[in-house]
Image (cartoon, grey):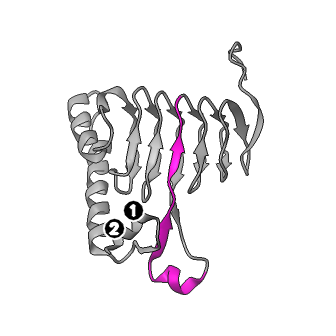
């Protein structure tokens, strides 16, 4: 079993010293660099880069990604149409990151799938494991939000700015804080929080 196979299986794998994974991350970093150096109005070039960087996104012309934008691999990310990513987003996609339709991700957000050993020796050997992150449709993530490994956020929920999301958030709620917690339900008839 390769380190890549272990990563996909959710087992401990060597992320730091495996040549295959290092090369895949380097390819993704090069594509992110190209994307982030491409003018915003050059949609043809940006979409070409996004298609290569995010091969599991059905149609990159139906999402909007502002620069800078960073990923680890790119191929572990799926994004539904109508979703928007503001400036300075980092998707650490060591495990699958699934983002539904019409999700709005505020600036300076990080989605982190990797977990590292508590003991220094295995951590220094480069071991890690990864757990997926899943966002349902119609989610709004405020600025500077951190989402940790294994988190699921239910449809229509709102995560307030500066939140640390370490546990699942149900559908149809407003949640914020460190740690993030549910504050109230979303009221469909209101335009205010």
Assess whether mark 1 and mark 2 are in contact (beta carbons under 8 angstroms).
yes
User: Element at badge 1?
Assistant: helix
Residue 179 located left or right of residue 165: right
Residue extending furthest toward the right: 183
- Which is nearer the eye, 142 or 181? 181
Q: As drawn, which residue projects farthest toward the top?
A: 189
Q: Nearer the viewer, residue 117 or 42?
A: 117
186 relative position to 115: left or right: right
185 in relation to 75, above or below: above
Q: CA distance from mark 2 to mark 1?
A: 6 Å
Q: Is residue 37 visible?
A: no
Vertical placement of residue 92 versus 122, above or below: above
Under circle 2, the secondary element is: helix
Q: Position of residue 163 (x, y in %)?
A: 67, 45
Quarter of the image with the C terminus is top right
The answer to whether residue 136 is magenta is yes
Image coords of residue 87 (percent x, y)? 46, 39
Residue 58, quarter of picture: top left
- Image vertical order of residue 100 relative to residue 168, above or below: above
* Residue at 27%, 50% in the rendered image: 31
Q: Where residue 151 appears, x then y in whole percent?
A: 59, 50
Q: Quadrant of the N terminus?
A: bottom left
Residue 79 lies within the magenta run: no
Provide the residue designation for mark 1.
8
Residue name at image x 25 percent, y 34 percent: 47
Neighbourhood count class around disc 2 (C-alpha, 10 Å): few under 14, some 14–19, many 20 upward: some
Task: Determine which of the numbered discs, if any, sits on residue 4 in the image.
Answer: 2
Residue at point 26% right, 36% down?
46
Task: Give the crowd class for mark 1: few <14, some 14-19, many >=20 residues within 10 Å.
Answer: some
- The reply to whether residue 181 is in sight is yes
Residue range in magenta is 119-137
- Looking at the image, which residue is at 44% across and 57% down? 95
């Amino acid at each position: 079993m390769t380190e890549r196979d272990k990563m996909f299986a959710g087992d401990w794998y060597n992320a730091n010293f495996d040549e295959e994974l290092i090369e895949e991350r380097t390819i993704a970093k090069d594509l992110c660099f190209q994307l982030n150096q491409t003018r915003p109005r050059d949609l043809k070039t940006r979409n070409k880069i996004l298609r290569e960087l995010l091969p599991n996104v059905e149609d990159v012309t139906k999402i909007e990604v502002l620069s800078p934008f960073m990923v680890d691999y790119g191929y572990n990310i799926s994004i539904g149409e109508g979703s928007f990513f503001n400036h300075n987003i980092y998707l650490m996609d060591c495990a699958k990151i699934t983002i539904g339709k019409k999700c709005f991700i505020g600036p300076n957000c990080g989605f982190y799938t990797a977990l590292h050993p508590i003991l220094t020796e295995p951590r220094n050997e480069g071991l890690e494991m990864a757990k997926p992150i899943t966002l349902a449709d119609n989610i709004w993530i405020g600025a500077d939000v951190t989402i940790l490994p294994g988190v699921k956020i239910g449809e229509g929920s709102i995560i307030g700015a500066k939140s640390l999301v370490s546990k699942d958030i149900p559908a149809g709620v407003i949640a914020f804080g460190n740690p993030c917690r549910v504050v109230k339900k979303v009221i469909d008839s209101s335009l205010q929080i």
